Amino acid sequence: MGKPIIILGIESSCDETAAAVSSNDKILANIIATQKVHESFGGVVPELASRAHQLNIIPVVDQALKQANITKNAIDAVAFTNGPGLMGALLVGSSFAKSFALALNIPLLEINHMQAHVLAHFAVHPGNELSPKPQFPFLCLTVSGGHTQIILVRDHFDMELLGQTQDDAAGEAFDKIAKLLRLPYPGGPFVDKLSANGDPDMFQFPHPNAPGLNFSFSGLKTSVMNFLQKETAKDPDFIDKNLNHLCASVQHTIVSILIRRLEQTVKQTGINRVAIAGGVSANSGLRNALMNHTDWEIFIPPFEYCTDNAAMIAIAGYFKYKNGLFADQQSTPFARY
């Protein structure tokens, strides 16, 4: 078998400072430091995110090494997110990774954040080693606060973008509408939780049009805003009285838009192996809607691999290491996909 490949993964693309350690495709440690500082602002403040990353990066890496029960000298390579994301946040992670690798004289592996979300499906989760992995080719719906994409995955690094949002991402729509409903940030999980006790058919909202296999969510946000302004003008307590129903109706609409595009993609490509990834893949409405498609082969990642994490960076690094796809000290982050 030979010596396993030990990868240290670093993730700092937005407001999660994360480090993970993998041994081949098995995750030994996955540590995430969430930044609470943004809650009072109703969204991520880039400068505050960068400062928090600087405070968190060393303790998070130290904790990951301890949880994995290894020393830094056992690491074969450092994988890090080099984009897309917030530039200041990415610079903290990439600078640490380059310095760490240089000090230990080990190779660097630069990882595309969106590819890593897809490759999280190939991480062997402790205690769940026998869970099935998707066979190539498969479709992956990657949905988060910053991205909404349908990707055709032919191999670990052979991916084709079939469709994407032309404005707001699905997670962004959840959070912006949650703000209109006076819910805390990030609002997506609150909408999901409150939806459980609401009627998804109580209020009807439009499905914005987008060409091909693309998405659009900004029109939905505007429609909900106009609806709420109209109803609260008649009854100032309208939101409080109907909060569960509003959340259920909004969630049903967003999930329906996503599923409709997936159905169209499956029909066009003839591929019925469907995976989801990204923060919104933790949404119960989306998961339940997928499971209703009994003619599809469905792959849903563990909850801890849905939101931004370093396990997905480490597993992407493992496949890059095996293919000899190394970076160098001149690597520079990129903000946009």
Image (cartoon, helix red, strand yellow):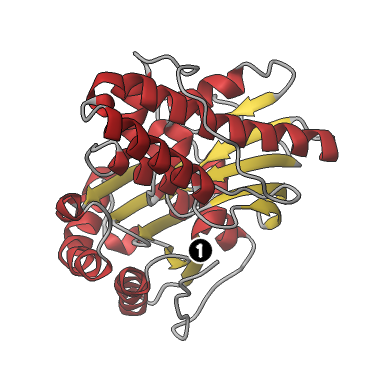
Residue sitting at 45 percent across and 17 percent down? 202
Residue most extreme to the front? 234
Quadrant of the drawing holding the N terminus = top right
Query: Residue 60 location in percent, x, y?
Result: 22, 55
Query: Residue 304 location in percent, x, y?
Result: 37, 36
What residue sits right under mark 1 in the picture?
111
Query: Residue 15 location in percent, x, y?
Result: 29, 57
Q: Residue 301 vs residue 154: left or right?
A: left
Q: Secondary structure at mark 1?
A: strand
- Camera-side residue of 321 and 34: 34
Q: Compared to 136, does 166 lie above or below?
A: below
Count of numbered tags: 1
Q: Quadrant of residue 262?
A: top right
- Camera-side residue of 257 and 305: 257
Q: Compared to 68, does 83 lie above or below?
A: below
Query: Residue 331 location in percent, x, y?
Result: 47, 80
